[in-house]
Each structure stands twice: as structure tokens, then as C-alpha cells.
Amino acid sequence: MAAQTALITGASGGLGLEFAELFARDGWRPVLVARSGDKLHALAADLTARYGVEAVAIPLDLAQAGSAERLFDEVERRQIAVDALVNNAGFATFGPFAETSLGDEREELQLNVVTLTELTKLFLKPMLARNRGRIMNVSSSAAFQPGPFMAVYYATKAYVLPFSEALWAELEGTGVSVTCLCPGATESGFQDRAKMGASGLFKTLPVSKAASVARAGYRAMMRGKRLVIPGTMNQIVAFLPRLSPRGMVLRISRGVTAPR
């Protein structure tokens, strides 16, 4: 039987790299997608050498309009059947909304929301035709409350959570599952790209290792679970806004994310 194939976006570092490692270790063929062509090809060669899998690198900037269809067409051209889709790529902008870059936020919305939605739709249809498949959408503990100074990022992750949960319910009994991963602060290049050095977020809350978060998400995806929030503190952070007055939630969130 041919190896199953997992397509992983944002695969050149952080959680994406850890997901690639997990799939390759278990004998899956990883299809790696990210902007960084050199890093991606080096990772594909390394996974192939260490695990004997046929790792594939497809360099592509998914923050650009139309990139989801270009990726799907490329995968189809190579006659690759995707058994698992990991929508991991995403980034944040940080700072007062009146001062942050509109261009950056346009790409943030495209990558975190539009491309994720398009990739899910494009790869879901062939999965349903085969009556099997797994999709993981990476959201965040940010999905459970608003985030002053990261308003657009928190809003994009708030979209991913109910979108994924709705699909999980729609697809019950089809052989295809959708899992939403909601990690808290995680060690990766995320905070550097978002220029969050002045934020209190990574100083106030516990920071998880990318490898442990990826393992939790991977296990949940393989079991077809609807939602996974790694870490007890992150589960508390996700649950408390449901019980607290909205104004209090906003003040606490502002205090955690505000520049220091």
C-alpha cells in the first residue's frame, strides 16, 4: 500500500516543522509548503534521508490572493492525493490598530482566514470522494477572547475555531474529520515576525515547546477529535471568558498583550 500523504503549510519552522517530523516518522509522505524555498528543500531532503519517505517541497507564499488554487493545481499536476491537510501557516501583527500596517493586515487576513478556508474547501472534496481524510486547522487560545493590540490576529483565530467546529459536525459519518488546534504562547518564529518583543504576552503566560504542542495536535487529529487545547493553563484561559463579564475580559486581555 502506498504511503499516505500529509500536506503541511507553514512547514519551514515552528509547529509546521514539528508536524512534518511527526508525519515522516510515522511513514507518511509530507508535502511541505512555505515561502522559504531553500529551507523547505533542505527540510525535505533531511526528512527523506532520515525516514526514507518521499518528502516534497512546494515553495509558495500563501499570503497572496489565489495561492490556494495555485497550490491545489500544483498538487493535482503532480498527481498527489492528500490524505491529511494541516492548515498551520499564519502570522500576527502587533501594535495599536491605528498605527499598524494595512498591507500587513491584508496579508494576515488572506493567510489566516481566506487561504485557510480555500484550502479546506479544495482538498475536502477529493477526501469526501475517497470517504477518508483528516484536516487540522491551527487556531489559537486567542480565539476565545478579543485581543487589544493584536485585534486582527485574535479576530482571525476567532474565525478559524467555529468554522472548524461547524465542519466537524457537518462531516460526521463521512470518513473525513476536522480538528481545531488552539495552542497558547508557543516557542517559534511567530513572535519575531509579529515584532512582539515589547508585548507582555510571552512574559506573562507560560510558553509551550513547539514539539509538545504539535504532538498534542497530531494525536487529536489522528483520533478525529473536534478540538484540542494543549496545556492546563491554556484550557483555563479559554474557559474563563465564558464566565467573566466582557469588560473584565477586555481589560485583562489588554493588560496581558499591551506593550511594556
Image (cartoon, grey):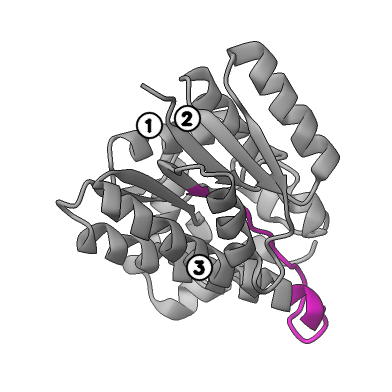
- 163 vs 14, left or right, is left
Rounded to the nearest whole Å, what is the CA distance between mark 2 and mark 1?
6 Å
Amino acid at circle 2: Arg
Report whether 22 appears left or right of 148. left
| Disc on res. 118 | 3
Q: Would residue 132 be seen by someone viewing this image from the given angle?
A: yes
Circle 3 residues within 10 Å: few <14, some 14–19, many ≥20: some
Give the answer, above or below, for where 161 lies relative to 197.
below
Q: Considering depth in this image, is 174 or 129 the residue closer to the camera?
A: 129
Q: Give how far apart the Cα atoms at labels 2 and 3 are.
A: 26 Å
Residue assigned mark 1: 219
Q: Residue 2's x, y, as percent? A: 41, 25
Outermost residue on the bottom side: it is 98
Q: Which stretch is magenta?
A: 86-105
Q: Are marks 2 and 1 in contact (CB under 8 Å)?
A: yes
Relative to 215, say whether 145 is above or below.
below
Considering only vertical position in the picture, is 212 above or below 36? above
* Quadrant of res 196: bottom right
Is disc 1 placed on a helix, strand or loop? helix
**Residue where numbered disc 2 is placed:** 215
Circles 1 and 3: CB atoms closer than 8 Å? no
Quick check: is 102 in the magenta stretch?
A: yes
Disc number lying in front (2 or 3) = 3
Residue at image coords 50%, 57%: 139
Looking at the rendered structure, the number of numbered marks drawn on it comes to 3
Q: Amino acid at mark 3?
A: Glu
Is 92 magenta? The answer is yes
Query: Where the C terminus falls, by quadrant?
Result: bottom right
Q: Give the mark nearest the N terminus, 2 or 3.
A: 3
Residue 62, percent from left and from top: 68, 61
Which residue is painted at 59% across and 26% down in the image? 21
